Amino acid sequence: MTVGEYGDDSMEHLLNRLEMFARTKGRDKIDIYECKSPSEANSLTAFRFVAAPAFKTWCIGNDVQGFSVDYALPKNGGTAPPLSSGPVKRMRYSHFACNVVHEDLAYPLDVNAMQAKLDLKKTVEHSFDGKLPAEHGHGTEYVAPPDTQDRWKRIDPLNVMNPGIGGLSMAPEYKEDKPAGVSDA
């Protein structure tokens, strides 16, 4: 997380809260590192934006398939949802003080990765009372709720802005059924 002082003692307040957390939950649960220079802070900020692309490169270099998801969980202590099949790599990261989790999962080539993703969606939504997708939208992989689909149709009646999004048709004016490859799971 990146923090700063905004002139209202917010930094002191944050550090006090982190210290209280460390005392009550254990020092092994938290690491605090303070950047020593602006250059170091810039490098750390850049790291956030290379994690996901680096994962894709890692998958290609290791001859595996991978996917990235984002989901929101109610407060549950940070427990990771169980997976239906074991990935060869699981990378979880999130925003500080936010229940949105980003997860990169890599599987051998003989695993049905789309089914693994849909199984994770089902677990997140039905067993953890969460939502997948959460932060980055439905894209063309997931079916959006009917009220969301209706709103998109109202604001884009010609279907030219995002054809195929959220399980909608890719055809002009939504004249065909949902696009191939979209699952209701």
Image (cartoon, rainbow, N blue to C red):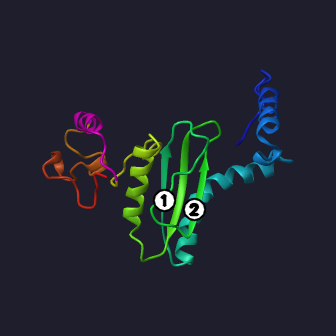
Which quarter of the picture shows residue 78? top right
Q: Judge depth for marks 2 and 1 and give the one in front.
A: 1
Residues in magenta?
142-155
- Residue type pointed to by label 2: Arg
Residue 63 screen position, x and y as percent: 51, 78
Pointer 1 local density, CA inside 10 Å: few below 14, some 14–19, many at least 20: some
Which quarter of the picture shows residue 49? bottom right
| Residue depicted at 59% across the width and 54% down the height | 92
Residue 52 screen position, x and y as percent: 56, 59
Q: Main secondary structure of the magenta part?
A: helix
Pointer 2 local density, CA inside 10 Å: few below 14, some 14–19, many at least 20: few
Q: Left or right of 84: which side holds 178? A: left
Q: Secondary structure at mark 2?
A: strand
- Residue type pointed to by label 1: Leu
Residue 31 screen position, x and y as percent: 79, 47
Residue for badge 2: 90
Residue at far right of view? 36
The answer to whether mark 2 and mark 1 are in CB contact below 8 A is yes
Numbered marks: total: 2
Q: Looking at the figure, which quarter contains the N terminus? A: top right
Q: Secondary structure at mark 1?
A: loop
Residue 109 screen position, x and y as percent: 44, 76
Magenta region includes residue 153: yes
Q: Left or right of 55: which side holds 34? A: right
Foreground pick, 70 / 122: 122
Residue for badge 1: 83
